[in-house]
Amino acid sequence: LIDPESEGLETARRIKARHPRTRVILLSVYDRYLAAALEVGADHYLLKGCPTEELVAAINRPAGVAEPRSAEGGMSIEP
């Protein structure tokens, strides 16, 4: 989802509301949307520029399984 404001969060919320088993990974330049990502039910929240391995791990990780924040700024969240 490409979104300079909050439409991406709203789209994520709608996806989770209609298809709760669909995994949603939000990728952003800003860490300030982490709380909002939790509220809409995102499964993972990563910062742009995180290592490729971290993105691949988030894609392959089951929903609801968190991984600690890395030094590069990626973070995964539990819904």
Image (cartoon, rainbow, N blue to C red):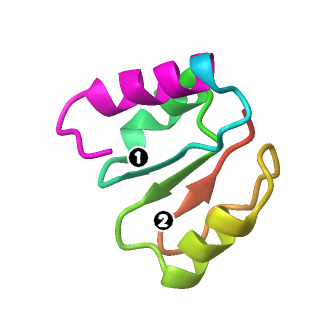
Q: Residues within 10 Å of mark 2 (few under 14, many from 20)?
A: some
Front position in the image: 53 or 62: 62
Amino acid type of disc 1? Asp
Q: Residues within 10 Å of mark 1 (few under 14, many from 20)?
A: some
**Residue labelled with disc 1:** 31
Quadrant location, the C terminus = top right
**Residue labelled with disc 2:** 73
Snapshot quadrant of residue 55: bottom right
Quadrant location, the N terminus = top left
On the rendered structure, is 72 left or right of 19? left
Q: Which residues are magenta?
A: 1-17
Give percent across and percent down for residue 51: 49, 81
Snapshot quadrant of residue 68: bottom right
Front position in the image: 50 or 61: 61
Residue 10, placed above or below residue 52? above
Amino acid type of disc 2? Gly
Q: Secondary structure at mark 2?
A: loop
- Dominant SS of magenta comes to helix
Residue 72, placed above or below residue 34? below
Asked if the residues shown at circle 1 and circle 2 are in contact, with their CB atoms under 8 angstroms apart, the answer is: yes
